[in-house]
Amino acid sequence: MMLFKNKKTILGIFVLCSMGYFGTVSNLEVNSFLRGEFILIPLQALALIYVTFWRRQDIIKDRQDAHPTRV
């Protein structure tokens, strides 16, 4: 995975992606309630990815604490 060192570059990419997504969802001809749900779907997906990654890191840390390596 390519790591960006410049936070402004990452912020710019996220802003452009979010503007494109919001513009696309705004042009959909669906019920206004569903339009709001479509806007929240990426936020829910990102929260799920974050929580999964956070839990995985905790599990790995607990395993390392339970079985320390012998030198």
Image (spheres, rainbow, N blue to C red):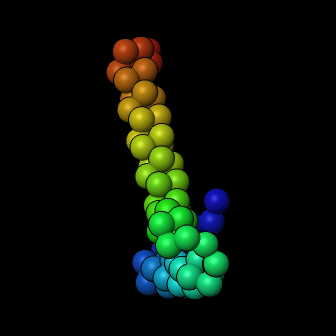
| Residue beneath the point at 44% across and 84% down | 8
Whether residue 34 is visible here, answered yes or no, is yes
Q: Residue furthest front?
A: 31
In the picture, the quarter occupied by the C terminus is top left
Instruction: State the residue at coordinates (48%, 66%).
Output: 33
Q: Quadrant of residue 57?
A: top left
Instruction: Say which residue appears at 45% left-offset and 80% top-offset.
Output: 11
User: Is 14 in front, or is 40?
Assistant: 40
**Residue 39 appears in the picture as rendered:** no
Q: Position of residue 14 (x, y in %)?
A: 51, 77
Relative depth, front residue between 55 and 36: 36
Image quarter hosting the N terminus: bottom right
Q: How many tags in the picture?
A: 0
Q: Position of residue 15 (x, y in %)?
A: 49, 82
Q: Is residue 2 above or below residue 63?
A: below
Tell me if residue 47 comes above or below residue 21 in the rendering: above
* Left or right position of 61 against 12: left
Q: Position of residue 37 (x, y in %)?
A: 49, 62
